[in-house]
Image (tube, helix red, strand yellow):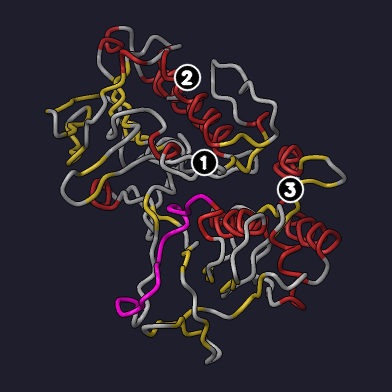
Amino acid sequence: MAAATELRDRNIPVTILEASSRVADPWRARHPKLRLNIHRHFARLPGHHEPRHPGTYLPRDAVVDYLSEYATGLASDIHFETCVQSVHRLEGGWQVETNKGTYSCSHLIVATGRERKPDMPIWPGLEEFGGKVIHAADFAEPSSYDGKKVLVVGAGNSGSDVLNHLSRANPARVWISVRNGPSILPSRILGFPMHRMARLFSRTPRRALDPLMAGMQWLNFGNLRRHGLPRHRKGGGSRLLADGVTPALDDGFVKALKNGRFQAVGQTVGFSPYAAELADGRTVDPDVVICATGYRTGLEDLFGHLGALDNQGYPLCPAGQQDSRNPGLWFTGFGVTFEGFFYAAGVSASRLATSISAQTSPLSHEQRTTHAAQLGAPQSLTLKGTLQ
């Protein structure tokens, strides 16, 4: 929607293809206590006001309301329940096959999100395990885990979010299975929201980012290795800039770890009917396993043949940059910044819209630009853009 707004501001017609039946569908599906991990100051989209909410970090329903309000100005351009089945390059443009017909366009913008498909590991013995196994994307109302033994696999951004919520609930026991320790920052320092400092991080020289984050983690939490959380071989800044992994924000889970409510254990390597098996030979017996094991873009089926993706399935030009191999193909929402996905969407949208406008003559302004805000293949997958 940010890209469409920027294009319309330059008098370039836009069509948005949306696989679901309504705006912000992925957000509506998440548990009601979910919050953005970015400050509301950085949650504004182009041409619109900052979210009107008193909270520092917006709750799920406030995000849904903001996106729905933003969509009202684009309503006539959004084609809902339209799933993309294939994409073909034509001379001078693109052909997009959908469940509702064929679209042709000069420019195709892909905005389905870098965290669209939950990535579930395949462990030996998992099919025989008698407990419940879910991805962090399907984390339910936190109180529903009261009295249950819970194994959270992964303590990165989404894992820490799950653990923060569980710290305010009453599970019988919580194990945190980690292979590499996360980079963890406090959500507030002396009452000041940590993410309000995102611009400072983005302007810090890369060589100084890792020591800066490591120092802030140590000052606020001490040596977490004493509590079973190892340090990752990469620092928090390097992981974000190189791998797109944002630092985790603590809001209760570190305290629960230190006081013994939560226990850090080793890497999960397999399952038996009644237990999860750990790398050190120990076992734990959870009722619920929550896999905070990341996401994938799910772009390979539609764009893998174009040479536009790296070996992990991420766009080589992730944030509105021109792709010399595929003129007229643009990706937005796949780049990561310290300011968060909303801010990045605005930067990317302005960049690609400026480039498209420069390439578009007055005559070709009548040509349609298709903005694929949601793409999907109805048989094999349904691509839903996400914001986290």
Q: Label 3 amino acid?
A: Ser
Q: Residue furthest front?
A: 147
Q: Where is residue 131 in the image (x, y as percent from the top left)?
A: 40, 73
* Residue plotted at (43% across, 12% down): 10
Q: Nearer the viewer, residue 374 or 282?
A: 282
* Residue plotted at (69% across, 70% down): 261
* Residue plotted at (40% across, 21% down): 4
> Badge 3, how many Cα within 10 Å: few under 14, some, many 20+?
some
The mark that comes first in sequence, 2 or 1, is 1
Quadrant housing residue 173? bottom right
Say above or below: 308 vs 109. Answer: below
In the visual, does 109 lie left or right of 185? left
Disc 3 + disc 1, Cβ < 8 Å: no
The magenta-colored residue range is 126-141
The mark that comes first in sequence, 3 or 1, is 1
Residue 187: image tag: 3
The mark that comes first in sequence, 2 or 3, is 2
> Badge 2, how many Cα within 10 Å: few under 14, some, many 20+?
many
If the image is split into quadrants, where does the N terminus sit? top left
User: Disc 3 and disc 1: Cα gap in Å?
Assistant: 20 Å
Q: In front of the other: label 2 or label 1?
A: 1
Residue 118: within the magenta? no
**Residue beneath disc 1:** 32
Q: Label 1 amino acid?
A: Pro
**Residue beneath disc 2:** 70
Say above or below: 285 vs 7. Answer: below
Q: Nearer the viewer, residue 261 or 158?
A: 261
In the visual, does 306 lie left or right of 122? left
In the visual, does 95 lie left or right of 15? left
> Badge 1, how many Cα within 10 Å: few under 14, some, many 20+?
some
Say above or below: 356 vs 220. Answer: above
